Amino acid sequence: ITLNANPSILSPDGLSISTITSKVEDDLGNIITDATNEITFAVKSGSGQLTGNNPQNSVNGVATINFQASTTPGTATIEASSPGLISGSTNVYVYSSANPTEIGGDITTNTTWTLANSPYLVTSDVIVKNRATLTIEPGTVVLFNSGTSLRIARDYDDGALRAEGLKNNP
């Protein structure tokens, strides 16, 4: 089973909805169009709720359900399972898009981008240098304006990047 969330980023308003689509696929990633498996959806971590019939039978190998955001920012992991199939999961990122943390310029001291202050919006090039380390916590969402980048210096004043996600919170 593969899952996809659309959209994958929601506001923590208690109202925003993401459509979670599960697909029953073969080993090559092709949808099994005659599959009618019963699919059970579950929120495995994070907050929010599923709305719609659950479980439900797939039609032409596809089943969908809605995920409604809570008022708590963070990452929600939704899983789909069915007897005899390998379960699939996807993440929905819940954050306040009205107030992103804007970032740009040089990072010259050790810095941590936190899930609590997520999302981060890179508005101009960010360069990590002077032996500084940029740490990005699991689940933190980083967005980039067009034409911007994140670079790690690689010369006499090397910088470092530490971004270690978790299986259920990349």
Image (tube, rainbow, N blue to C red):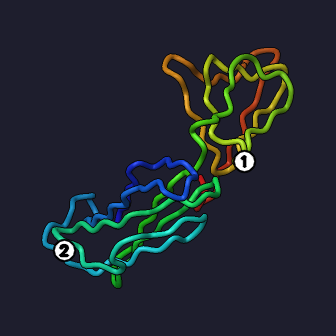
Residue 13 placement, left or right of 37: right
- Residue under the point 51% across and 70% down: 43
Q: Quadrant of residue 27?
A: bottom left
Quadrant of res 45: bottom right
Identify the residue position indicated by label 1 in the image. 116
Q: Is residue 26 left or right of residue 45?
A: left
Query: Residue 67: image x %, image y %?
Result: 44, 63
Residue 79: x, y in percent?
46, 69
Residue to which mark 2 is pinned: 35
Helix, strand or loop for disc 1: loop
10 Å neighbourhood of mark 1: few (<14), some, or many (≥20)? Answer: few
The quadrant where residue 72 appears: bottom right
Residue type for callout 2: Ala
Residue situated furthest left in the rendering: 34
Look at the picture and state if 131 lies above or below 55: above
Residue at the bottom extreme, as displayed: 83
Tell me the residue at 23%/73% (across/down): 58
Q: Quadrant of the N terminus?
A: bottom left
Q: Residue at x 13, y 72 (%)?
A: 34
Q: Are marks 1 and 2 in contact (CB under 8 Å)?
A: no
Dot 2 surroundings within 10 Å: few (below 14), some, or many (20 or more)? some
Q: Picture coordinates of residue 138 (x, y %)?
A: 67, 51
The amino acid type, in three-letter code, at marker 1 is Ala
Quick one: SS at disc 2? loop
